[in-house]
Amino acid sequence: MLNKKFKVHFSVFLLWLFTISGIFGIISTEHSEWFLEMTPINLMLIFIILLVNIEKLQPKLFLALSIPFFLGFITEGLGVNFGLIFGTYTYGENLGFKVFGVPLIICVNWAILTAASADVAKYFSRNRIITALIGAALMTGLDFIIEVSAPRFDFWEFKNGIVPLQNYLGWLVTAVGAHLGYQYFNIKTNTKISWHILLSITVFFVAFLFF
């Protein structure tokens, strides 16, 4: 029990350490590029923190996470190559290795956000349809905040620098699908970790609305 509590507390400490150091690192002109280039590693560490705090790593967990991962990959691929779903945009260089123009880490991000927002959504309801809608709304709201900093961080940029309404509608619909598929497997993640993941990511990007 003590080890479990320590693991959770240490994970929360790491999440906020990454967040706060990332904010100050990017603000500093001397080291900002290095911190931005570390974004894929940071997201992988968050994904690992999510996984190690799950009590039972069953095969169905990876099947459940594969739904937002591959759904994210397909929809993002349609976006960057054909301008479908989210609109016309291209990915920059700070999200790492790409397949068909899509950074694989962005698909990991789809899995992270789906799992974390599902836990937060279950705080408000136990109905799978309602939690899917709440979780999708949380993800879409977070995307709205991220879009402000994405071009500046060389994550991605929309054609003519304008984020279309289509992007947010696409996010909402895709996220609902990701949630319905993921939540079908009823994965028992650590709710406290999920809350901190979602909050830390939100705080990170909200900070850059002001800097």
Image (cartoon, rainbow, N blue to C red):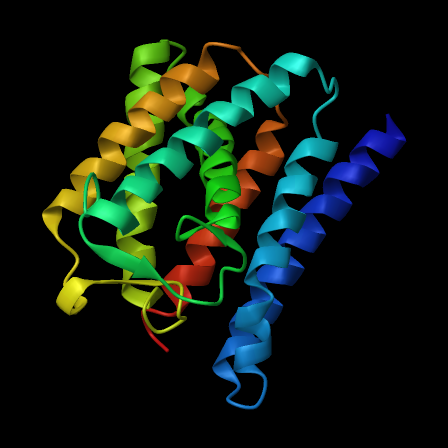
Q: Which residue is located at x 63 percent, y 48 percent?
A: 44
Identify whether 66 is placed above or below 199: above
Give percent across and percent down for residue 149: 34, 67
Give percent across and percent down for residue 20: 58, 66
Q: Which residue is located at x 46 percent, y 15 percent?
A: 183
Give percent across and percent down for residue 163: 17, 57
- Asked if residue 187 can be seen in this view, the reply is yes
Give percent across and percent down for residue 167: 19, 46
Quarter of the rendering occupied by the N terminus: top right
Residue 189, by quadrant, is: top right
Quarter of the rendering occupied by the C terminus: bottom left
Residue 114, by quadrant, is: top left
- Asked if residue 124 can be seen in this view, the reply is no
Label tally: 0
Depth order, front residue of 191/172: 172
Identify whether 15 is placed above or below 57: below
Depth order, front residue of 41/122: 41
Q: Is residue 169 left or right of residue 32?
A: left
Q: Residue furthest right?
A: 2
Q: Which residue is located at x 14 percent, y 68 percent?
A: 160
Q: Which residue is located at x 12 percent, y 52 percent?
A: 164
Q: Is residue 163 left or right of residue 2?
A: left
Q: Residue furthest bottom?
A: 30
Q: Is residue 14 left or right of residue 71?
A: right
Q: Is residue 139 left or right of residue 199?
A: left
Residue 97, by quadrant, is: bottom right
Depth order, front residue of 6/186: 186
